Image (cartoon, rainbow, N blue to C red):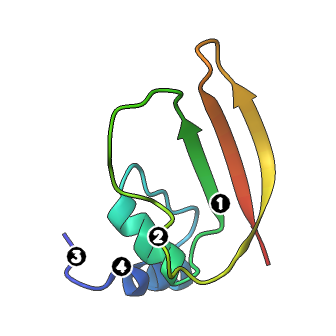
Amino acid sequence: MVNAPTADVVTDLKTTGEGDILVNSSPTVIKALLSADLIDRLYLLVLPEIVGGGGRLFEDGLPASRWTLSRQETGALGEIAVVYDRAR
């Protein structure tokens, strides 16, 4: 466990480590990294099912950013998997 701001931990990992950093299914961490402009690639899975309310991944107030669609696939049940790369 790390007791530090998310952006600080990721910045440190990027400067001292090797390889990719993967954040799996953690909207809180992903929102913090989007706010700090530390995400280079987004993998999103969109499911065509209405299950009620829930938190938003892309909250109001995030800094403006540009993304390029790198890949898109549609599954048999209508699910859509997309990959976006950060355009810098």
Helix, strand or loop for disc 4: helix
Kindly identify which numbered label has been placed on residue 56.
none
* Residue at 80% in and 49% down: 70
Residue ID for mark 2: 59
Q: Earlier in the sequence, mark 4 or mark 1?
A: 4
Specify whether 55 is left or right of 37: left
Residue 38, given in percent of the width and then of the height, sits at 56, 77
User: Depth-wise, is mark 4 or mark 3 nearer the camera?
Assistant: 4
Residue ID for mark 4: 6
Residue ID for mark 3: 2
The answer to which image quadrant residue 37 occupies is: bottom right
Specify whether 7 is left or right of 63: left
User: Depth-wise, is mark 2 or mark 4 nearer the camera?
Assistant: 2
Specify whether 51 is left or right of 37: left
- 57 up-or-down from 4: above or below: above
User: Depth-wise, is mark 1 or mark 3 nearer the camera?
Assistant: 1
* Residue at 61% in and 56% down: 42
Identify which amino acid the numbered label 3 is placed on.
Answer: Val
* Residue at 47% in and 70% down: 59
Tag 2 and tag 3, C-beta contact below 8 Å: no
User: Depth-wise, is mark 2 or mark 1 nearer the camera?
Assistant: 2
Identify which amino acid the numbered label 2 is placed on.
Answer: Glu
